[in-house]
Amino acid sequence: MTTGTAQAGRAFIFDMDGTIVDNMAFHTKSWIAFFERRGQVHDADEFFRATAGRQGHEIMRTYLGEHITREDSALLDLEKETLYRELYAPHRATVAGFDTLVANAQRAGVALAVATAAPNDNIVFTLDGLDLRKHFNAVVGAADVARGKPNPDVFLLAAERCGVAPEHCIVFEDAPLGVEAARRAGMRAVVLTTTLPADAFAEFDNVICVARDFSELDIGALFSAEPIAATN
């Protein structure tokens, strides 16, 4: 396991859900089912755009009321995440090209981190379930920061734990709130269109690449790339 501080000058920071694994449809389905049990009906696309990257307790308070405490949301989140894991477990797999990119990055001396809004049980479910944790210098989740995305906290902490300055980090994301969090952290971003089309990210000035998966990404090209907005 390579967790701990790395004396590296560059880092890749990966969002987990929707980026390392293509699972956001299952998260959204489980949220929709969770709220339907409580008499609420939500459009799946709108719900994803409004919530992807936010922590569970933030979502609970938004849709169930500000009276929901962290203790309340922890119990409710257990119900929702149980639904999610039941739905997604048979489909659990990394996005195409991820394993090769990680191996190449390690050979190139690039530090690797995960920065996710997921609770610890889901981190264990994904990273340990797929035997991925050993690849990362740092894993930062909802339990490590007070605020979810679009606040930059989770990315900044991941960079700090890798020993890499934010401007030398590249974030991999699938959600607008995550790309905004990277922007606020002073980091460039690679967008994966696992969930939303490229035009959903047109407004961002920190996106350097849009790809359907990791299979055609070149490490050297990414670190030398300028934001797409600056080249148009």
Image (cartoon, rainbow, N blue to C red):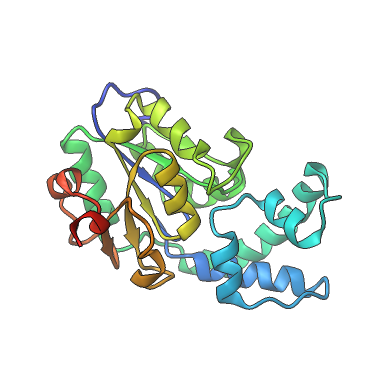
Q: Position of residue 33 (x, y in %)?
A: 70, 73
In the rendered image, which quarter contains the C terminus? bottom left
Query: Of 80 and 204, which appears nearest the observer?
Result: 204
Observer-nearest residue: 148 or 107? 148
Residue found 33% across the figure and 53% down from its top: 205
Left or right: where does residue 9 sit relative to residue 134?
left
* Callout count: 0
Which corner quadrant of the image does residue 41 belong to?
bottom right
Residue at the spot x=52%, y=71% of the render? 25
- In the rendering, at what x and y percent does residue 78 appear? 72, 53
Q: Quadrant of residue 44?
A: bottom right
* Residue 145 to residue 91: above or below: above
Residue at image point 83% right, 75% down: 39
Q: Is residue 104 left or right of residue 118?
A: left
Please state, as top left, top right, bottom left or bottom right, where the N terminus lies in the image. Answer: top left
Q: Position of residue 227 (x, y in %)?
A: 25, 52
State the image coordinates of residue 3 (x, y, percent, origin top left).
Answer: 40, 29
**Viewer-proximal residue, 88 or 194?**
194
Looking at the image, which residue is at 61% across and 41% down?
147
Q: 109 or 180, which is in the foreground?
A: 180
Furthest toward the right, the residue is: 67
User: Hey, which quadrant is residue 43 in on the image?
Assistant: bottom right
Q: Is residue 215 above or below residue 37?
A: above
